[in-house]
Image (tube, grey):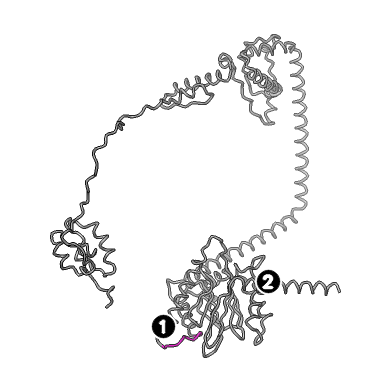
Amino acid sequence: MADADIIVSCPYNPAHRIRRYKLMNHISKCKKYNKKENMVECPLDKTHIVDQNFLREHIEMCSSIGKAADMDIGNVEVRDPDPPVAGGSVYLNENWEEDPEVPRYDPMEVSAKKPVIRCVSGLSKAEKKKFRDNERMRIANLKGFHSSATHEAPLRPLRPPRILQKDFDEMKIHEDEKHDCDDDHNASAHANFVPNFHNSSFHRMLYDELAPKDDEIKQLEQSLRNTDSAISLKDYFQQVTRENGNFSISNRNQKKQTKVGTLLKDESSTKEQSMNDTVKTDQITKNFDEKGPVLDEIFNQFTERLAYLNDIQSTAAVESARARRYDTRTTIFSPEGRLYQVEYAMEAISHAGTCLGILANDGILLAAEKRNTNKLLDEVFFSEKIYKLNDDIVCSVAGITSDANVLTNELRLIAQRYLLQYGEAIPCEQLVSWLCDVKQAYTQYGGKRPFGVSILYMGWDKYYGYQLYQSDPSGNYGGWKATCIGNNSAAAVSSLKQEYKEGETTLKDAMALAIKVLSKTLDMNKLTAEKVEMAILTREDGKTKTKILPANEVNALIAEHDRLEALAEQAKKEKQKS
């Protein structure tokens, strides 16, 4: 048994049995909860915890005494945990219990001379109202307004609500002689004037006519306030009244008559419009009676078409509900004989990065798209797309990366078990077959889901030489000469069918073909080495060698492809001109 595997007891609690290499870590933790105060460490070995009274005897018999032959045993003392503080007492003149004087700050006092709205709490409704009135007066005085003008300013009435057209029929003209008997309006009447609106449209129109003058009064009042004049609003109304003193009763009566005539004219036009609408309605009714059968037939056809569409929609809903009964478990077949969960796993692969494999005469090539090109990503911990399983087999994955990590670990375990048991490398097809058995089991047992990963394998064995395999989530696999998985795999396979030449393709040709296919199928403007990872497998001196191409070689292949494409495009243009 190795020295590290020896089980020892904890000196603080013999019930704790741990391995020797973990003893120091355990002692540091167990010491915190130890209630024995007379236990001390041996100065020769930190793992020896003994009673302080027997420390001298222990040191004489300690197994580690040879490590400290020159140590004076008689001078062994336990360190005082609380050594006395050197020096005398220190006296300070500062009194820490006395609070320093801080200038008093009253926010109400500070804001008293500023035109800001202050708030208080804990007041009753009456006190709050009084406080708001005082605040208004304070702000008005700060802005230069006269306090008397603030109190004497009348409340302007609100605009009367707009009434409907039917209310004009109930219009009654009220001639109020109380307001027309005096040509000279004094200031007090204007200051206390509040219009008494009845349900009369005439009074509403008359008030609307005079409303612009109210706006002029407001503008004039604002200009007076800006010039810091202390005149009251009552004096201002007296001035306006003297300027408009020639507004006589006859002018008012004439204006009323004009308004009444306008209203009567509008009423006659309204009646004429209603008569025209009645004639049009009668004409439409007559036309409908004449074309009734034709419209009924059109309506019946529309109803039948609508019923047909509703039947289709309900049938589709029923079929969709039936289909959903078979896609919740991997062990249930649909009526069409399909396993929906397996198809969903394959759909996840179609959205993953593209992986390409080409079998050549003198080697095999794997090319994979690198989706994540974030500059902040650490390349050391980046999840690779190409995995080495053993000395003779390499694979590339497309799909869910976490599922791929589980499967690649399983592949490596299978390969190492075979090597340990039989003393030789596992054949490529046997490794692929054993993993596909595991993937197929996840489509047959309940409570599990298929792995969302497709894998491309490239390898060499003494039985079949260079080999290229592909497996999918259903557990199916097959050998290929050139294939592609992942996003835009259908377009890539179509290009490979046209460009691949069996028996004539070398590894160099395979590299050029891979760059050409990826440049056409990948969703990117410019192909770069940061977005593509390429690996090759060859045989040299009787040994299998795998190599991931560095970025400069990949960039050289891309540059060569761009040069050939430019020459081909130029030749095509010259041919069209000739």
- How far across and down, in percent of the image, does residue 523 sit? 64, 66
Q: Which mark is residue 417?
A: 1
Q: Position of residue 195 (x, y in %)?
A: 63, 19
Q: Is residue 51 above or below residue 231?
A: below
Magenta extent? 422-429
x 47%, y 24%: residue: 110
Which one is in front, 493 or 305?
Answer: 493
**Amino acid under disc 2:** Ala
Left or right placement of residue 126 versus residue 512 in this view: left
Q: Residues within 10 Å of mark 1 (few under 14, many from 20)?
A: few
Is 571 a magenta residue? no
Q: Is residue 428 magenta?
A: yes
Amino acid beneath label 1? Arg
The residue at which mark 2 appears reads as 559
Secondary structure mostly seen in the magenta stretch: loop
> Which sits earlier in the primary sequence, circle 2 or circle 1?
1
Q: Position of residue 106 (x, y in %)?
A: 43, 25
Q: Is residue 114 above or below residue 298?
A: above
Q: Is residue 285 left or right of residue 421?
A: right
Q: Indicate the position of residue 292 as horizontal and vertical percent values.
A: 74, 53
In the structure shown, which secondary structural element does the residue marked by tag 1 occupy? helix
Asked whether the residues under the numbered discs 2 and 1 touch, taking CB atoms below 8 Å apart as contact, a structural biologist would say: no
Residue at 21%, 54% in the rendered image: 79
In the picture as drawn, the residue positioned furthest to the bottom comes out as 463
Quadrant occupied by the N terminus: bottom left
Which secondary structure lies at badge 2?
Answer: helix
